Image (cartoon, rainbow, N blue to C red):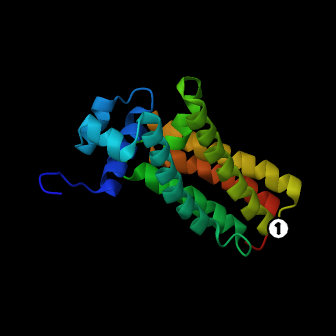
Amino acid sequence: MAGRKQFDIATALDAAMTQFWRAGYADTSLDDLSRATGLNRSSIYSSLGDKDTLFLRCLERYTARYGDKYDAALSCAADRPLAAARAFFDVTLERIADPELPDGCLVAQTVMATPVLSASVAARAREAIGLQHTRLRTALKAGRLHDEAAESFAAHLAAVNQSLAVMSRAGTSTEQLRAIVDVTLDALARVLGPSD
């Protein structure tokens, strides 16, 4: 329409996602979202939804983007489970090291903010954390770990992965984060035994 400002929804969603990631759900106002996206409040509501709806869209975008990367990293788990676990952590470490992205993890910080979230946002954040655990358990089972060990290591790897995001936000160096991953992978290697 003539006189109507056009914008790219994907770009606006990425800008909103980065704002939520940087400041968290509770500390992001509609004015913050307006500044980040370049849209006025009415455009945000009419095109992207209310704050909860927009946040859920951003969380979906984040989990899809990084979920695809985690899936690709774990794709070799049946033949090379240790290499797959290393590649899984590399996704997180590369994200943390990217100066264009906020520190931490949008999912982890959302789960930590559960008490101030709406029920639908809190449920979706818990589901996203659960998907990471499921993804890891499936890969470890394909990589020849029996059910109990796959379950235990999936929980451990998911917890380490989330702690990397939290620790990066606290200023832990990339070298220290890599050392944490190495200890975790050494433990997994002992359980897997030779041949990876």
Which residue is at a point 75% across and 57% down the rendered structure image?
A: 137
In-front residue for pair 184/143: 143
Q: Position of residue 121 (x, y in %)?
A: 56, 36
- Does 25 sit left or right of 161 as displayed? left
| Residue 112: x %, y % from top left | 57, 30
Q: 178 above or below 114? A: below
- Percent from the top left, x then y, of residue 20? 40, 38
Residue 185 placed where, x, y %?
Answer: 67, 56
SS at mark 1? loop
- The residue labelled by disc 1 is 144
Quarter occupied by the C terminus: bottom right
Left or right: 77 as drawn, with respect to 59:
right
Q: Which of the pair 85/125 is nearer the observer?
A: 125
Image-based side of 117 in relation to 101, left or right = right
Identified at 68% across, 47% down, the residue is 130
The part of the image, by quadrant, that contains residue 127 is top right
The amino acid type found where label 1 is placed reads Arg
**160 versus 72 height, above or below:** above
Classify the position of the N terminus by image quarter.
bottom left
Q: Residue furthest left?
A: 3
Residue 169: in sight, yes or no?
yes
Q: Is residue 171 visible?
A: no
The residue that appears at 24% across and 54% down in the rendered structure is: 7
Residue at the spot x=36%, y=50% of the render?
13
Q: Nearer the viewer, residue 107 or 30?
A: 30
Q: Nearer the viewer, residue 99 or 53?
A: 53
